[in-house]
């Protein structure tokens, strides 16, 4: 019937028949313009693409789903699983059947289709996951129109090099050979010739092992892997690990589906695994492929039961529908076994110390000894073809015979790309830091993991805190809290690593306890407090370590009305520790507990403001120094700096070990600084340093003193000593000062970083001179992009120094915005440069009258600076 309709159409409407055929037609598509365009054809590509979108924070995306009538279910499945929020628009593009076959009619139609999509969307960037056959046309058309093309790794197929051109290089049938001849020798079809090769040129390549892709030409590369950063981790992974009790001493075998008789396959495989298990006295867990048949599963179970004695060492994981890479990252098994599974290639990216071993040569040899090779010819060809790809990767070991088995644990994999790419701390931390500043949190997380591939316990404390901060952005507070509980429960490992011996960790935990408290989750907060206290007790100085946690614990007790317990706990802790670590903006917690500490009435509390000496006389017990110090804090926070100094000087007259322990000198230094007595402030800090030289709060106060004295270089040096981590700009309250100091010392990178991380609400309280100086600094350094971003973000601030911003818009070709900025500010140009800039801007906008007025003013005020051509505009 379909053939008859075509004949009928040919007879009645011959012109329409030919125009609607694949020779001349193209799809009907109505698409909006977007900055980014992506092409995918199956579900695996979708997951890769969505991961990259998160990894690079890509927005303004058009997604084109390619499909054929051979599988109409696939585009429906993809459409159902697409995260709509990631894409501005989604389009379906039908291709002819068997699009990878060499056929001039089909290739011509596909090329016209791609051209229509690209012209309609008019993107700046295109992202593809395939690079051969008809996909080459995307690259050709995009680059001819000045659009950058970026390649995303699809899997090991990306590493097949020229071998990816299987259709082209193989003889094919007569029809394909004839069509290939037409493309190569008939001028009319020369435009299709690129489909016989593969696209080599890209702007960027995103791949797990970009250093291996020498067959492509690209300007830059980014390490990218779908399962990195815990992106695909789920609770199912942890539940399965717990269910089967799999640990780091076990081996994992990753199964694959092959066209082999189920009995032969199971018998050969279990025989090899049994030898490995006995050789190393290890348990081996078999992870089935989701497409493994029930018959193969039954054959495996039968063979395991037949070959293994009572001391069973081989186990079949019943569940198949879960991702194995996250499980490897969680369990970190000693060895991952397989035949030609791509998991072997990526094992080291999720667990650097796990050895990846291919049994393919040994398996084929054993299978051929027990069965005729002709019986499993297809299987041999498939396994051999896949094995050639696996063999490219140097980090995968290979077992060719039984004698090679003993080498699995004795011999390291051949030094290859993994050794160069993982554990390069400096480069990965630098990328992580930059990604964090750009709000690309998943990218920051991945690079932190690659910097320390042996696990969290190998991270220095500052990187560990950075890791928690990034995870909070990527996975949320609940995940980070679970991570904290996990670290505390596995305390032995992290104590050895030094993480649980550092107060920075406990200060971080204290913030999480605060969050739980604010959410009203008191029981969980107290559970975390209890676990922290138990772990920290192993340290000789544990009270000092968990001081921040203890203060928050007291806050919770007070909130629940347990005043006596709160007073007792604070009295114990703070009488033995230094409470002056508390920064000014957190000291309000002390005020909330003031009455609890003193145990006196509101009338006595008012004595703080009237007579500090008299207050001390009233407090006649062992805690009088502590209470006087708290009163000093209250004076300082209420800006009664003279009374604070008077009170603290009185306290210092008391010669006791308690005074030395509490160290009021730091508080005294703060008060002197706020009074403008920098000499006395410095002397107090010198005294404070005698007891606690490396104390965080002392370094902060030294930095604040240097800032007050306008000693910008020393301020930044002190600030870096106080915050030695990789992300030096994590304290929001210090960012305005860091910005101002960086401008004065002409440190552009730090100035831009501080600005990018500054919250919008902080700008409201920022000195306008600092903002104006920052604009001028960016203009001097010709940072046009940053100036435009600055204007987009803070255009309501009421800026006066707008010339650099207007110049930035002009440099980027946005003349209307430049003009709008100039005309929005009620100020007149005052320099020759400003007058000339406005005059030239109006010339470009063809505003002749306005232009003439500014040229005239320039010639009148600055005749020696005016260009000769200025007279031509009058």
Image (cartoon, helix red, strand yellow):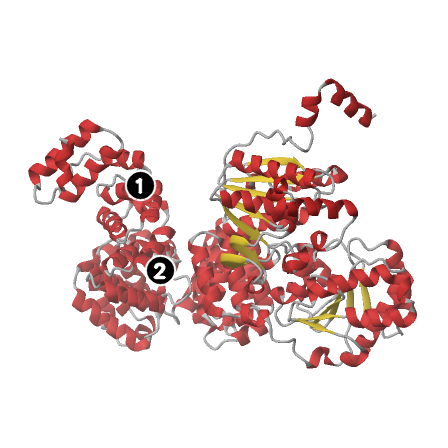
Quadrant of res 495 = bottom right
Q: To which quarter of the image does residue 663 belong?
A: bottom left
Q: Quadrant of the N terminus?
A: top right
Marked residue nearer the N-terminal end (2 or 1): 2
- Percent of width and height locating residue 870: 14, 37
Residue 786 visible in this rendered orientation of the protein: yes
Q: Secondary structure at mark 2?
A: helix
User: Residue at label 1?
Assistant: 809
Left or right relative to 31: residue 541: left
Left or right of residue 658, residue 326 in this image: right
Q: State the SS at label 1.
A: helix
Instruction: Assign the C terminus to one quadrant of the image.
Output: top left
Question: How many C-alpha atoms fall within 10 Å of the one at disc 1: few (<14), some, or many (≥20)?
Answer: many
Question: Where's residue 775, x and y in %?
Answer: 26, 48
Vertical relation: 665 (above or below) 221: below
Please report the residue visible at 38 percent of the width from the left and 67 percent of the height from the top.
724
Can residue 667 be seen by looking at this rendering? Answer: no
The front one of 775 and 527 is: 775
**Crowding at mark 2 (Cα within 10 Å: few <14, some 14-19, many 20+):** some
Q: Which residue is mark 2?
A: 598
In this rendering, the answer to whether 681 lies above or below 522 is below
Q: Residue furthest top?
A: 12
Q: In front here: 84 or 739? A: 84
The tag on residue 733 is none
x, y percent for residue 609: 23, 55
Residue 654, given in percent of the width and then of the height, sits at 25, 73
In the image, taking residue 394 as reference, residue 740 lies left or right, namely: left
Q: Left of 792 or right of it: where is 648?
A: left
What whole-number distance in Å separates the C-alpha atoms at marks 2 and 1? 61 Å
């Amino acid at each position: 019937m379909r053939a008859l309709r075509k004949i009928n159409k040919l007879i009645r409407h011959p012109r329409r028949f030919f125009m609607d055929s694949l020779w001349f037609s193209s799809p009907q598509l109505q698409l909006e313009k977007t900055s980014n365009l992506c092409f995918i054809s199956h579900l695996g590509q979708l997951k890769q693409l969505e991961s990259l979108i998160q990894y690079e924070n890509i927005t303004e995306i058009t997604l084109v789903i390619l499909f054929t009538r051979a599988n109409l279910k696939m585009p429906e499945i993809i459409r159902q699983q697409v995260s709509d929020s990631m894409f501005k628009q989604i389009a379906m593009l039908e291709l002819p059947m068997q699009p990878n076959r060499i056929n001039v009619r089909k290739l011509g139609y596909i090329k016209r289709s791609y051209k229509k999509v690209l012209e309609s969307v008019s993107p700046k960037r295109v992202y593809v996951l395939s690079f051969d056959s008809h996909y080459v046309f995307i690259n050709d058309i995009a680059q001819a129109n000045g659009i950058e093309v970026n390649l995303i790794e699809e899997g090991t197929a990306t590493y097949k090099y020229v071998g990816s051109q299987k259709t082209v290089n193989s003889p094919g049938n007569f029809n394909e050979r004839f069509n290939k001849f037409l493309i190569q020798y008939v001028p009319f079809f020369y435009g299709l010739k690129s489909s016989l090769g593969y696209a080599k040129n890209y702007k960027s390549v995103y791949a797990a092992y970009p250093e291996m892709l020498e067959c492509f030409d690209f300007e830059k590369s980014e390490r990218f892997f779908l399962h990195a950063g815990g992106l695909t981790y789920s609770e199912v992974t942890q539940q399965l690990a717990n269910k089967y009790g799999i640990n780091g001493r076990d081996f994992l075998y990753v199964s694959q589906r092959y066209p082999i008789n189920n009995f032969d396959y199971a018998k050969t495989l279990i025989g090899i695994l049994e030898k490995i298990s006995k050789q190393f006295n290890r348990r081996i867990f078999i992870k089935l492929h989701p497409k493994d048949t029930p018959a193969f599963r039954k054959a495996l179970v039968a063979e395991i039961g037949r070959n293994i004695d009572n001391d069973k060492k081989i186990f079949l994981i019943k569940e198949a529908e879960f991702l194995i890479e996250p499980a490897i990252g969680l369990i970190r098994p000693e060895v991952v076994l397989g035949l030609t599974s791509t998991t072997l290639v990526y094992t080291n990216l999720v667990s650097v110390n796990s050895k990846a071993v291919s049994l393919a040569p040994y398996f084929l040899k054993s299978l051929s000894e027990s069965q005729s090779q002709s019986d499993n010819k297809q299987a041999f060809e498939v396994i051999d073809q896949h094995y050639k790809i696996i063999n490219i990767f140097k980090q995968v070991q290979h077992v060719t015979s039984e004698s090679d088995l003993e080498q699995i644990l004795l011999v390291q994999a051949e030094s290859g790309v993994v050794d160069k790419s993982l554990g390069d701390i400096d480069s990965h931390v630098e990328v992580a830091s930059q990604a964090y500043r750009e709000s690309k949190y998943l990218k920051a997380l991945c690079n932190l993991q690659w910097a320390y591939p042996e696990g969290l316990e190998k991270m220095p404390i500052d990187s560990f805190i950075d890791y928690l901060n990034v995870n909070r952005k990527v996975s949320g507070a609940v995940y980070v809290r679970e991570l904290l509980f996990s670290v505390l429960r596995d305390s032995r490992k992290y104590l050895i690593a030094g993480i649980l011996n550092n107060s920075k960790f406990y200060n971080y935990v204290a913030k999480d306890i605060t969050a739980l408290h604010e959410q009203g989750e008191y029981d969980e907060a107290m559970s975390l407090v209890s676990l922290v206290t138990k772990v920290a007790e192993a340290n000789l100085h544990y009270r000092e370590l968990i001081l921040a946690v203890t203060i928050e614990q007291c806050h919770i007790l007070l909130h629940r009305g347990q005043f006596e317990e709160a007073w007792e706990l604070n009295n114990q802790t703070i009488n033995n520790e230094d409470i002056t670590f508390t920064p000014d903006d957190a000291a309000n917690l002390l005020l909330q507990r003031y009455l609890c500490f003193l145990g006196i009435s509101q009338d006595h509390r008012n004595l703080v403001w009237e007579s500090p000496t008299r207050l001390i006389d009233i407090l006649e017990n062992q805690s009088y120094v502590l209470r006087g110090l708290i009163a000093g804090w209250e004076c300082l926070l209420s800006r009664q700096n003279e009374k604070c100094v008077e009170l603290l000087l009185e306290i210092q007259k008391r010669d006791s070990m308690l005074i030395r322990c509490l160290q009021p000198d730091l508080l005294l230094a703060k008060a002197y600084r706020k009074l403008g007595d920098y000499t006395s402030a410095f002397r107090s800090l010198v005294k404070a340093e005698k007891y606690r030289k490396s104390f965080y709060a002392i370094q902060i106060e030294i930095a604040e003193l240097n800032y007050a004295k306008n000693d910008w270089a020393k301020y930044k040096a002190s600030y870096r000593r106080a915050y030695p981590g990789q992300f030096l700009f994590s304290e929001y309250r210090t960012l305005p000062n860091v910005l101002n100091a960086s401008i004065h010392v002409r440190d552009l990178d730090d100035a831009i970083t501080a600005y990018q991380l500054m919250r919008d609400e902080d700008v409201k309280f920022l000195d306008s001179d600092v903002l104006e100086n920052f604009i001028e600094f960016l203009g001097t350094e010709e940072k046009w992009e940053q100036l435009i971003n600055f204007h987009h973000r803070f255009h309501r601030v009421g800026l006066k120094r707008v010339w650099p911003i207007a110049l930035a818009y002009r440099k980027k070709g946005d003349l209307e915005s430049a003009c709008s900025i100039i005309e929005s500010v009620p100020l007149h140009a005052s320099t020759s440069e400003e007058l000339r800039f406005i005059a030239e801007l109006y010339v470009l906008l063809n505003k002749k009258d306005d232009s003439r007025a500014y040229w005239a003013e320039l010639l009148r005020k600055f005749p020696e600076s005016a260009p000769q051509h200025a007279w031509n505009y009058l």
